Amino acid sequence: MEAWIGEQWHRLITRAADRSHAAHAVSLGSVQRSVELLFRSAGGAPGVRVVPAAPARIGGPRDWLQRLAGTGQRAAVSQLDAETLALPPVIAVFDDAALNRDLYLWLAALAAGHVPGGDWLPANVAASAEALRRCPGLRPRWQRLCAAHLAQRPAVAGLDAVAAAAEALVQTALRQEPVGQPLPVANAARPLRPTDVAPVWLW
């Protein structure tokens, strides 16, 4: 009986801590053909396969429910290497299925123009500019995705000094219209890493 109660409690807390929008989720399988076509047409390497991403460690603040449930530490985030473009098997970031679908397409265009190496933040700013140059029709979708994602980002004022500085850089990068020049990361002790901030779903 105690084990059953514990299991039900854990399930309840885990559901309560979940910040995704399952009712508006879009699966990679449902858009994979479109993703592959866009990746190729935007200049992506022909030998790269689109595959589901595995969960990886993520950064950023967690609320008390996530800490209680032990969640919010891992997520499937996009990754690109010489052989694969790994995308989340399901995207439920937004409470709008159209935005979740658009995010898959944006990530495909971003990957097509991404140059491996370099610092994470400037590299993604430059890749965003290149994606918009190659696929100008994506600009309205990019703008909607940016606005929706910025509304989800942690409030800088609520973070400690180090986390606030990192988050401010990310939000500045997202608010700027990409112009093809890497964003200077001034006064940083080291280059910003993805795990220094909450996941930037657009990168």
Image (cartoon, rainbow, N blue to C red):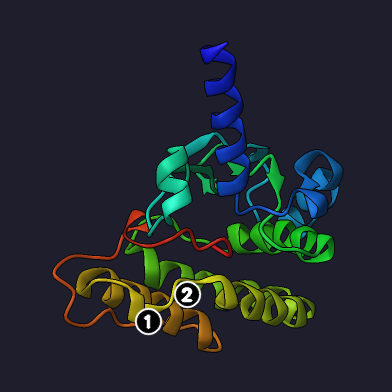
| Horizontal relation, residue 170 to residue 119: left or right | right
At 60% across and 54% down in the image, what residue appears?
19
- Tell me the SS state at disc 1: loop
Can the viewer see residue 84?
no
Numbered mark located on residue 125 in the image:
2
Can the viewer see residue 9?
yes
Residue 155 drawn above or below residue 68: below
Answer few, some or many: residues within 10 Å of disc 1's Cα (few below 14, many 20 plus, some between 14 and 19).
Answer: some
| Horizontal relation, residue 54 to residue 100: left or right | left
Instruction: Determine whether label 1 and label 2 are within 8 Å by CB.
Output: yes
Q: Residue 88: x percent and y percent?
A: 64, 44
Instruction: Say which quarter of the image contains residue 181.
Output: bottom left
Answer few, some or many: residues within 10 Å of disc 2's Cα (few below 14, many 20 plus, some between 14 and 19).
Answer: many
Q: Amino acid at mark 1?
A: Leu
At 52% across and 86% down in the image, what residue appears?
175
Q: Residue 55: x percent and y percent?
A: 51, 36
